[in-house]
Image: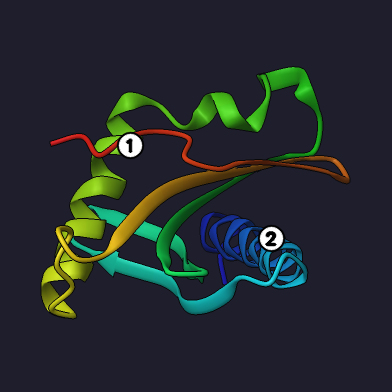
Amino acid sequence: MNNKNNLKFNKRKTGTDYEELAVNYLEKKKYFIIERNFQVRQAEIDIIARDDNTIVFIEVKYRTTSGSGHPLEAVTIQKQKRICHAALFYMNRNKISPENTSIRFDVIGILGDEITHIENAFDFIY
């Protein structure tokens, strides 16, 4: 494996480790994990969960230090639009009506060992 592929593998492994940390955190809060790493073209949702009767689409961002800013700052408007697009695709594929089902977009930021969970972090964006 060359250095570029090695770096890509290591970043994916690190991302998976932090997503696992987020899943454990959510399960302790009694969330039911429906799916992880749901992908559509040009978009991915890290975690899809149920919180009571609400379907929650969750983005996980991590940083080892705050040198590049807080991980929550990495969820830009463009990223939010991609997450919303993927959520709409997920709902269509699973025949989930937004009129009959409560949905929410959460963000989990992990900075070192500190987890920050923002419920209802942003609204649906077209």
Name the residue located 23 percent from the left edge and 57 percent from the top edge. 86
Question: Which structural element holds mark 2?
Answer: helix
Q: Mark 2: which amino acid?
A: Ala
Percent coordinates x, y for residue 68 in the rendering:
67, 21
Toward which corner of the image does residue 109 lie, by quadrant?
A: top right
Q: Is residue 90 above or below residue 104?
A: below
Name the residue located 58 percent from the left edge and 66 percent from the top edge. 9
* Quadrant, the N terminus: bottom right
Query: Which label number is shown at residue 118?
Result: none
Using a 10 Å C-alpha cutoff, classify the residue at mark 2 as few (fewer than 14 neighbours), some (14 to 19) or many (20 or more).
many
Nearest the eye: 59 or 97: 97
Q: Mark 1: which amino acid?
A: Gln
Percent coordinates x, y for residue 28 in the rendering:
78, 70
Q: Is residue 81 above or below residue 51?
A: above
Name the residue located 81 percent from the left edge and 30 percent from the top edge. 65
Toward which corner of the image does residue 100 lie, by quadrant?
A: bottom left
Q: Which residue is mark 2?
A: 22
Left/right of residue 64 with respect to residue 74 in the rendered view: right
Question: Which structural element holds mark 1?
Answer: helix
Toward which corner of the image does residue 124 lie, by quadrant?
A: top left
* Quadrant, the C terminus: top left
Q: Are marks 1 and 2 in contact (CB under 8 Å)?
A: no
Name the residue located 31 percent from the left edge and 48 percent from the top edge. 83
Left/right of residue 104 with respect to residue 15 in the rendered view: left
Left/right of residue 43 with respect to residue 88 in the rendered view: right
Query: Which label number is shown at residue 80?
Result: 1
Nearest the eye: 100 or 76: 100
Nearest the eye: 52 or 88: 52
